[in-house]
Image (cartoon, helix red, strand yellow):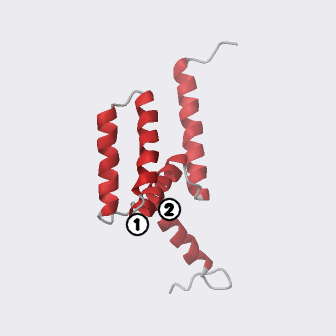
Amino acid sequence: MMAKSYEQRLEEQRLRQKALRERKRRERSPHRDDIARMLLHVIVRESVKGGSYEKLDRAMAIVTRELVAQGFDKRKTEQVIEEIIDRHEQGWQPRHRTHILQEKWKAEEEEEGSPDGEDDKV
């Protein structure tokens, strides 16, 4: 039996990832990036709202240190963090994942259909 080519393995991986993303979308399961984005938003929002910048500064110093250890530029990292905090101070809210909301609304509409399962379309 011949070994699979690199291109075949890449194509199979691409198909597996596509199927996984589709399943996660159907299940409305958040991706780790969704969780991380919301976690950052909540931490910054609550710190700004409460005026407790000391804990926020400590947390962002740790984030900066970890990103620099991964090879990111310290000054640029601090600049991006400051921009995020500034936006939150101005009342910024994260964008909703509208494709998820649209699927939820569609499912709710289907559930609200007539009792015999047929739509009331004329």
Q: CA distance from mark 1 to mark 2?
A: 28 Å
One can see residue 97 in this view: no
At x 60%, y 81%, the residue is: 113
Q: Position of residue 55 (x, y in %)?
A: 46, 52
- Hey, which quadrant is residue 13 in on the image? top right
Position of 39 compared to 16: left or right?
Answer: left
| Residue labelled with disc 1 | 49
Residue that extends furthest to the top in the rendered view of this protein: 2
Q: Secondary structure at mark 2?
A: helix
Position of 47 compared to 79: left or right?
Answer: right
Q: Position of residue 21 (x, y in %)?
A: 55, 47
Q: Amino acid at mark 1?
A: Lys
| Residue 61, placed above or below residue 46 | above
Front-lying residue, 27 or 89: 89
Q: Position of residue 22 (x, y in %)?
A: 56, 50
Position of 75 compared to 1: left or right?
Answer: left
| Residue labelled with disc 2 | 100
